Amino acid sequence: MLRSRNLVRYLAGTLSAMALAALVASLSSTAQVALVRRQMAERDGAALEYGERGTRPAIVMVASLGCGAEDFDNLAIRLSDRGFRIICPEPRGIGHSAAPPAMATLHDYAADVAAIVAKSGAGPVVVLGHAYGNTVARTLAADRPDLVRGVVLVTASGRAPLSDEVKRTIARSSDLSIPDAERVKYLATGYFAPGNDASVWLGGWHPVTQAAQFKAFNATKVDDYIAAGGQVPVLDIQGTDDVIIPRQYSKDLQNELGPRVTLVVIPNAGHAMLPEQPAAVEAAILSWMVALPQAAK
């Protein structure tokens, strides 16, 4: 993940000081730098915000548990600069996205993304899900195969359950009532490879959204999404230092689904991965997409 303030650091390495200052001054938030067009879609009483950048072919990015589109700022810039159209939904409860307070499942969250894809006219798309977002991405591929031509899973799980210690680490990492000095220790332990800067993940958490997403996940059968619909190619990107999805489970999905799954393991990356190894994630996606059938024009 990449929080807003860290996008400025990335841009600082690519733009002159004068150009960076002018760019930041012209925008109200750094998230708008990456996702320059903000749009709205609707579905069954839900208002769904999304940001986009670039042109076809399209990649839709679904954020991890309790987090929003800003997590993809860095990757959105990288891939749109390569010619891709990046579309990032804001989950219910983040930004201008909102939905009636009814019990939801992963099918509802996938239907939200489907409504955004339909509104954008970008389908069929590659859908990328980071961490929890991978379950939404796979559910979308299962429920709406007409909209999906490939799935990218970043630090995704198979069927192995999370340990109680991992669940505790997740809960403590996102508990905003805990002092930052303590939270960053949980973030470092649970989400980042040794030596990587965990403080970049202190911001950007949305506890109400996180709780609703946990309920949706627990209300959905794993067989509803595990195979991502059973047809499309899948890129499974794992990290060597992922504590939440340990290395002994990294081949589970490939073993279950067979040769349509391409496994890439990135060194010095934990469950956070996006702020840790953005160039390696970009390279894995670009290499895999070369072999995909061309998107419809």
Image (spheres, helix red, strand yellow):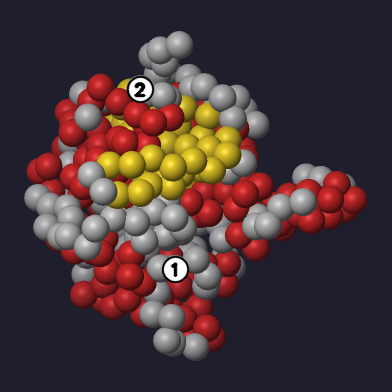
Above or below, 192 relative to 10: below
In the rendered image, residue 221, in percent from the top left (x then y), is placed at 9, 50
Residue 198 in view in this figure: no
Type of the residue with mark 2: Pro
Q: Nearer the viewer, residue 133 or 157?
A: 133
Could you tell whether 126 is left or right of 211 in the image?
right
Q: Determine the residue positioned at 40% across, 12% down.
A: 296
In the rendered image, residue 218, in percent from the top left (x then y), is placed at 15, 60
Above or below, 241 relative to 237: below
Q: Determine the residue positioned at 65% across, 31% down.
A: 81
Q: Nearer the viewer, residue 106 or 279?
A: 106
Residue 30 in view in this figure: yes
Q: Which mark is residue 205?
A: 1
Q: Earlier in the sequence, mark 1 or mark 2?
A: 2
Above or below, 273 relative to 187: above
Q: Which mark is residue 124?
A: 2
- Which image quarter: residue 4? bottom right
- Which image quarter: residue 244? bottom left
In the rendered image, residue 170, in percent from the top left (x then y), is placed at 34, 72
Category of crowding for the residue at label 1, using alpha-carbon neighbours closer than 10 angstroms: few (below 14), some (14–19), many (at least 20)? many
Quadrant, the C terminus: top left
Residue lying at the far right of the rendered structure: 18
